[in-house]
Image (spheres, grey):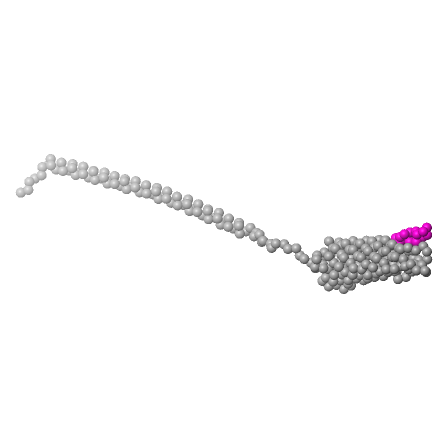
Amino acid sequence: MRRALDPGNNLKLNGFCSVWRAGCLQGAHRAAAGRSGASVDGYRRTRERSARMFVRTVAALVGVLVLLSGVHARAAEPVAVEEPPKVQQIVAVERGGFVEVDLGAGFIVNKVDERRYGLSVLSSVYAGYDILPILALSVGVTAWAAPVSEDESTPTPSGDLFFLIPMARVQVALLTTERHFVWVRGGAGFSFGLPRRLDEASYGGNGPAFSGTIGFERFTRLRHFSIGVEAGALVVTKPSVGIGVFAQPTLKYTF
């Protein structure tokens, strides 16, 4: 037969159960509070990691943009094309200002003031300019020394004549190749016949003079230099009209 429970014991049991339930509830609350705190800390750490990742991503994008902009700027710059070294162009014929010297021989074909003259020596120096490949102008002076021919018919007084002839000339090329030219040239000037007097008698004289020549010129492979030959006639008007024919080599330097 079961024994009836003591009321006092029941009270003790109920009190114990109440304390136990209170402890369980407090433990549950603490566990829940712990879990809540852990969740907040994890959320904060997650947000911090996300923020750091975002900053790093933005920095990487900015770096890529800067790099691309630098590449684009370098690509947009004009590329300097390296030119080949300049080489002076060598031309077969130099044209421009020139100096020409001539030296030749000739003789006067007619009598001058009733006197005959023998083999003569001519020399000239001219400076000019090539206006066109076929046209040139020059100015200078020609010296012509004519020795008198001594014979019984020569009137007295007799002596040699020396003509100093400043002259301007025009030259025109008729036939041309790369280095060879055939040309004609005409000139006009003023002749000074010396001596003016011989044995107290009038001998020389001053007057107009004219020339006409045909010539050949070759430009050498030695730059600026050309050589040639010409033949023609030279006419003086004092002391009387005298016609001389001559031939001479020429040497020209073109600047």
Q: Seen from this angle, which residue lies furthest left? A: 1
Q: Going 49% across and 50% down the picture, which residue do you hit? A: 68
The residue nearer to you, when weighing 140 against 24, is: 140
Q: Going 9% across and 37% down the picture, which residue do you hit? A: 6
Count every numbered label the image shows and give the total: 0
Q: Which x, y percent locates residue 138?
A: 80, 55
User: Residue 105 falls in which quadrant of the image?
Assistant: bottom right
Does the rendering let one see residue 250? yes
Q: Which x, y percent locates residue 155?
A: 95, 57
Q: Which x, y percent locates residue 23?
A: 20, 38
| Quarter of the figure that contains the N terminus | top left
Which stretch did the figure color magenta? 192-207
Overall secondary structure of the magenta section: strand
Q: In this rendering, would 16 be left or right of 238?
A: left
The residue nearer to you, when weighing 134 against 142, is: 142
Q: Going 42% across and 47% down the picture, which residue do you hit? A: 57
Q: In this rendering, would 124 be left or right of 2?
A: right
Q: In this rendering, would 210 be left or right of 43?
A: right
Magenta stretch contains residue 72 = no
Q: Seen from this angle, which residue lies furthest top? A: 8
Q: Which x, y percent locates residue 93?
A: 72, 59
The residue nearer to you, when weighing 145 against 90, is: 145
Q: Going 13% across and 36% down the picture, which residue do you hit? A: 12
Does the rendering let one see residue 172? no
Magenta stretch contains residue 199 = yes
